Amino acid sequence: MVNIREVKESDNPVLSQLIKCVFEEYDAPRDGTVYSDPTTDQLCDLFREERSILWVAELDEKIVGCCGIYPTPGLPDDCAELVKFYLSPEARGQELAKA
């Protein structure tokens, strides 16, 4: 069963590991990216920013993805950026992204 909820403090280590595993899976650059950004280890704190939210996707009570909205500096006041959109391999192809 799929559950989508807001991030909580205890999610931090699982989400950090999930994001880093996706980078490793695709051999994506690590320096200068979210992979090496210290905020990746503290996503719950980062998404306490006003007008931001990070959703966590669970599949059978296991965290399998995340997706956030963040008021990135430099954007117009009425805009936000879709950020931290990652899914584990077992979650892909199951229409979680649509949810």
Image (cartoon, rainbow, N blue to C red):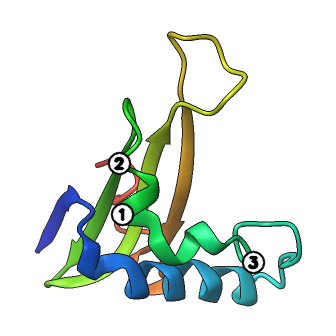
95 is higher (above) or lower (below) than 10: above
Q: Secondary structure at mark 3?
A: loop
State yes or no: discs 1 and 3 in contact (Cβ < 8 Å). no
The three-letter amino acid code for the residue at tag 3 is Ser
Residue 49 is left or right of residue 83, and the answer is left
Q: Quadrant of residue 12?
A: bottom left
Where residue 34 appears, x then y in whole percent? 70, 67
Front: mark 3 or 2: 2
Work out whether mark 1 precedes mark 3 in sequence or the reverse, and give the earlier one: 3
**Residue bearing the label numbered 2:** 48
Residue 88 is left or right of residue 21, and the answer is left
Query: What's the mark number on residue 97?
Result: none
Identified at 53% across, 27% down, the residue is: 80
Identified at 46% across, 55% down, the residue is: 46
State yes or no: discs 2 and 1 in contact (Cβ < 8 Å). yes
The three-letter amino acid code for the residue at tag 2 is Arg
Where residue 89 appears, x then y in whole percent? 50, 84
Identified at 15% across, 65% down, the residue is: 3
Query: What's the mark number on residue 44?
Result: 1
Q: Secondary structure at mark 2?
A: loop
The three-letter amino acid code for the residue at tag 1 is Cys
Q: Quadrant of residue 55?
A: bottom left
**Residue bearing the label numbered 3:** 36
